[in-house]
Image (cartoon, rainbow, N blue to C red):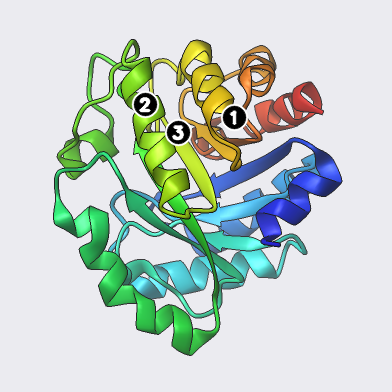
């Protein structure tokens, strides 16, 4: 049983706060993580689309661990952002990327580090859904096989592929700063077809939106931009999904 399974067994619905090492100094990241834990978040994800410096990830995690007791999960954009002081790592493939780097190459480069440092991997299918007129950072970088808001069958096909490949969870992601979140209808359709946990993030800006996502089938809600701009909404969202 993975840490994700344990959290869902305990809480039914979970909340993760995503902290990007590029967006603030480590000390500030630690303070924000502590606030998120006090509000009830269940884990701190650490990573971002543009992180390239392992030291900044390490220092950020060290500062976070001084302020929280909940798990710290790496959310790496490359092998270079894997850090030995993380508790867990989302060992993920961006399934709808056309770029081998995001599908498998960075994973091959990072696998031995995960083994050597004893970081517990959680295999994840990362599926990016395009909901904004202006592409998010991950869309710009990743050369996507685009899944639009109405491409529900396509999203289901990718999700089923993830489950049949043996992945432990699916992350339906609209991207950092997305104008709109992943549609409820898409989450519901994916939930009907797969049994593994569904994580949803991007564009979730209120408790009402978060509740819609869990009511549609999301098991975990992720907030990233809110940890940088409006920490208070984290508390409201957590209350809304419990």
Residue at image position (46%, 29%) is: 202
Report the residue that reaches farthest toward the bottom.
116
The local crowd at label 3, few if under 14, some if 14 to 19, many if 20 or more residues have their Cα within 10 Å, is many
Image quarter for residue 96? Answer: top left
Q: Earlier in the sequence, mark 3 or mark 1?
A: 3
State which quarter of the image contains the N terminus: bottom right
Residue at image position (47%, 55%) is: 166
Q: Calculate the distance from the C-alpha at mark 1 to the C-alpha at mark 2.
A: 30 Å
Q: Position of residue 99 (x, y in %)?
A: 14, 49
Q: Which residue is mark 3?
A: 172
Image quarter for residue 77? Answer: bottom left
Say above or below: 237 vs 138: above
- CB contact under 8 Å: marks 3 and 2: yes
Q: Position of residue 207 (x, y in %)?
A: 69, 18
Q: Which residue is mark 1?
A: 230
Q: Position of residue 70 (x, y in %)?
A: 74, 60
Residue 174 visible (yes or no): no
Q: Which residue is mark 2?
A: 155
Mark sitting on residue 90? none
Side of 72 relative to 167 (left or right):
right
Side of 174 relative to 198 (left or right):
left
Residue at image position (79%, 42%) is: 40
């Amino acid at each position: 049983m993975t840490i994700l399974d344990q959290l869902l067994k305990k809480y039914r619905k979970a909340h993760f706060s995503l902290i990007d090492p590029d967006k603030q100094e480590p000390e500030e990241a630690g303070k924000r993580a502590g606030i998120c834990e006090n509000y009830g978040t269940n884990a701190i994800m650490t990573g971002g689309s543009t992180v390239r410096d392992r030291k900044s990830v390490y220092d950020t995690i060290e500062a976070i661990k001084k302020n929280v007791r909940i798990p710290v999960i790496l959310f790496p954009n490359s092998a270079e952002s894997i850090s030995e002081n993380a508790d867990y790592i989302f060992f993920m493939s961006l399934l709808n990327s056309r770029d081998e780097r995001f599908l498998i190459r960075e994973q091959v480069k990072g696998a031995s580090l995960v083994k050597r440092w004893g970081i517990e991997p959680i295999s994840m299918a990362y599926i990016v859904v395009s909901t904004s007129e202006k592409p998010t950072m991950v869309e710009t970088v990743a050369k996507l096989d685009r899944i639009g808001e109405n491409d529900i069958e396509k999203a289901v096909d990718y999700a089923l592929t993830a489950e049949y490949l043996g992945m432990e969870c699916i992350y339906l992601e609209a991207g950092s700063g997305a104008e709109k979140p992943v549609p409820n209808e898409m989450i519901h359709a994916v939930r009907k077809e797969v049994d593994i946990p569904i994580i949803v993030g991007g564009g979730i800006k209120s408790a009402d939106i978060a509740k819609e996502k869990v009511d549609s089938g999301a098991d975990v809600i992720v907030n990233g931009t809110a940890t940088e701009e409006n920490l208070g909404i984290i508390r409201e969202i957590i209350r809304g999904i419990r």
